[in-house]
Amino acid sequence: MTTINDVKNILRDTLQIGDRADELQEDTPLLGNIPELDSMAVAMLITAVEEHFDIFIDDDDISAETFETFGSLCNFVEEKLSE
Amino acid sequence: MLNWFKTSYAQIGISGTIYYLADIILRKIKIGSIYPYCFLSQPLSAPAKKLRLSKNYAVRKIQPNDPRLLEILAPSICDYRFEQKAICIGAYKEETLTALLWFTTDVYHEDEVRADFIPPIDACWDFGVHIEPEYRMTRAFSNLWGASTVIMNDMGYEYSLSRISAFNHISLHAHIRMGAKLVAKAVFINIGPIQISLSNTRPLLYISFFKNSRPIFRFHKNDESITI
């Protein structure tokens, strides 16, 4: 639950999406649904996740599938935390 | 229709919505088009501080004869840009060209409308960003931009100017999130062979009747930030 809330807050702050972050559910699409998530925002988001959770994300770990839904992003973070 | 108007108004404001409607009509009846531009000034050091650059990407200037460049852009486009003495910088991952962007350090000859843009002496002009589709959700662009800022900084440029369509509010806000400031606006109205440009920076009004008649916009170091 904490991870989900933390990821939500990171999305809110990084993408500056305000209250729209509160509406994010596990199956909410990110790609194509949040226009703010562009190529530069992805990098800023990854950096923010690394700093917040103190994890290292390799380039080969991420792909479009990582950002497909809010749930897929949270799952990705939890997998990295369990490594 | 009302919902469309409300959404458009929220995203690009009243003037943007009017231009957008006028552009649709002009294109529909095939007599013209409208290009509203926002001019942004981006510090070349700002985003690199917020991003961790990856060692998997090698960022370097692209040579005009690089076959990987010619696979992405038509030779005529590359020739036109290199003839302007533009610099092309690419991000390579294992020698695959994943993303590229262009800078000019003198005058930028706009190819969408008839206009020339001249950055101040300590600034360059960036344009033509391209990211290969499979690398759009990766660190390719952030590495490209981060390393490009260092390359241009080393050449003595402190910031980079660019123009963005005022219709593209997402890109506009993305630039502002990266630290860019809006320094000027202009709209180019094309009707048949005539182009009318209106701007809040000089030339405030310019009517062009011929292909070679182009307004020249000079930007200055201390251009103030304006509201969107």
Image (tube, rainbow, N blue to C red):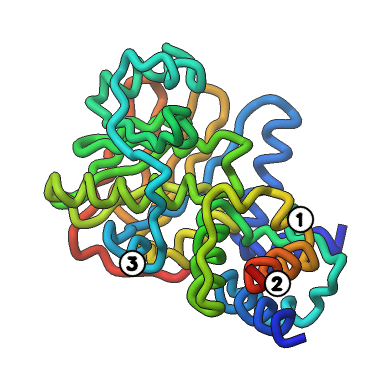
Q: Position of residue B98 (x, y in %)?
A: 49, 34
Q: Is residue B17 above or below residue B86?
A: below
Tell me whether circle 3 and circle 2 mark residues in contact (CB < 8 Å): no
Q: Earlier in the sequence, mark 2 or mark 1?
A: 1
Q: Position of residue B81 (x, y in %)?
A: 33, 23
Q: Secondary structure at mark 3?
A: helix
The residue closer to the viewer here, A63 or B12, is: A63
- Do pointers 3 and 2 mark residues of a single chain? no
| Residue B222 appears left or right of A47 | left
**Mark 1: amino acid:** Glu
The residue closer to the viewer here, B205 or B40, is: B40
Q: Secondary structure at mark 1?
A: loop
Q: CA distance from mark 3 to mark 2?
A: 26 Å
Q: Is residue A72 above or below residue B19?
A: below
Q: Residues within 10 Å of mark 1 (few under 14, many from 20)?
A: some
- Residue plotted at (31% across, 48% down): B147
- Residue plotted at (69% across, 25% down): B30
Q: Residues within 10 Å of mark 3 (few under 14, many from 20)?
A: few
The residue closer to the viewer here, B204 or B177, is: B177
State the residue position of label 2. A78
Q: CA distance from mark 2 to mark 1?
A: 16 Å
- Residue A68: which numbered mark, if any? 1
State the residue position of label 3. B49
Q: Is residue B121 visible?
A: no
Q: Position of residue A73 (x, y in %)?
A: 71, 65
